Each structure stands twice: as structure tokens, then as C-alpha cells.
Amino acid sequence: MRAGGGGIVVRFTLNGREVEVTTRPNATLLDLLRNELKILSVRRGCETGECGMCTVLVDGLPVRSCLMLAPQVDGRSVTTVEGVGDPERLHPVQEAFVEAGAVQCGFCTPAMVLTAKALLDRDPNPDERTVREAILGVLCRCTGYAKIVRAVRLAAERVAGGVRE
């Protein structure tokens, strides 16, 4: 990270690609992703860290991007839902969300998918309670979370069964 004409240059890996962007020192990661890099899957919700809609993975861990300053990702890896699977070959979590009907209106889906992926990366066979605790930080207004929990458990079965990462 270095200062540049009116801003700070931040270098990081975004969805597997190296990026370099000049931003304000006080810009949030949410603002950097949405406004400067046009990653609109990162949702703007409460902007206080309560709703979890802006969740991304930083070095594989779920982080609320509205609470993290953009310069803090310098030298790190950031994953948005665009970096999980691709349109021709969805990640098992994405497939399970579709199959279980856990997408509903879709507003929380990117954050839920990323949170579920992070959980399965560290615990490939979570029980229901562990799944519910993991997704606790992402609010969904459409469901009672049953379909989301079912989707995460289905994805866990597929990942544990040797289905692609």
C-alpha cells in the first residue's frame, strides 16, 4: 500500500485476480467493491455490521465489508460470490441453494453462500446447530432459515462425498 495523488493505492487479490486500485484512506471495503470495482453482489444493508448483507470472504473468513476499511485488504485475498463457481459450473453450495429453494428473493443469497462456503471449508460436516450458528450473522427476511440450513447440509454431503470444490 502506498499513497498516490489524492488516495492510497491498495493491491489485493479479488476473486483470484490481482487488482490495484487507488481509493480514499477512509473508504470502506463495501464502497471500494461496489462503487469503484462495480461488484454489485456485495449488498449495502444497514452499514453498521448488523445485517450481514455486505459479507465477503477475506483470506477465507467471512467479514462485513461495511466495517472494514479498504486499505486493510492490502496484500490479502478477497472473495465475493463472483469468485465462487462460475455460470457453467456452480460451486456445490450454489447448487444446493438452488436445489433446496434457499434463494427466495436473492438479496441475502451472496452473503449466505459465502458464509456457508467458509463454514464448509473449515468444517466439511457441520451439524444443524453449527450451520445455524454460522449463518446467524446474515439476516434473511424471506425464510425461516429452514431451506438455507437444508441447502448448507446438502452442500456438505456433496463436498464430503468428493464432489468438486
Image (cartoon, helix red, strand yellow):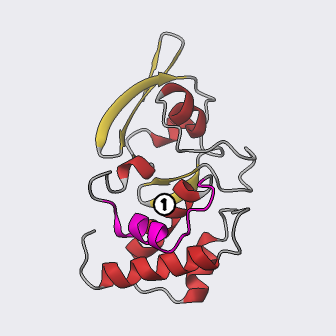
Vertical position of residue 111 compared to residue 133: above or below: above
Callout 1 secondary element: helix
Q: Position of residue 76 (x, y in %)?
A: 39, 46
Q: Does any portion of residue 7 appear in the rendered image?
A: yes
Query: At x 55% / y 44%, what residue is drawn?
Result: 42
For the N terminus, the quadrant is top left
Picture residue at 59% right of the left edge, 46% below the top: 65
Height in image: 57 above or below 19? Answer: below
Residue 134's quadrant in the figure?
bottom right
Please give left or right for residue 153 compared with residue 145 in the image.
left
Q: Residue at x 47, y 82 (%)?
A: 153
Which image quarter holds the C terminus? bottom left
Which residue is at the front of the view, 115 or 64? Answer: 115
- Frontmost residue, 24 versus 53: 53
Tell whether 18 sits left or right of 43: left
**Does 58 lie within the magenta span?**
no
- The kind of residue tagged 1 is Leu
Circle 1: is it few (<14), some (14-19), or many (20+) Cα within 10 Å?
many
Horizontal and vertical percent position of residue 114: 48, 60
Residue, x 50% and y 76% (percent of image)?
Answer: 151
- The answer to whether one can see residue 79 in this image is no
Q: Nearer the viewer, residue 9 or 134?
A: 134
Asked if residue 63 lies left or right of residue 77, the reply is: right
Q: Is residue 137 above or below residue 87?
A: below
Name the residue tied to disc 1.
Answer: 114
Question: Magenta segment, which residues?
Answer: 90-106
| Total number of numbered discs in the rendering | 1
Q: Position of residue 83 (x, y in %)?
A: 36, 50
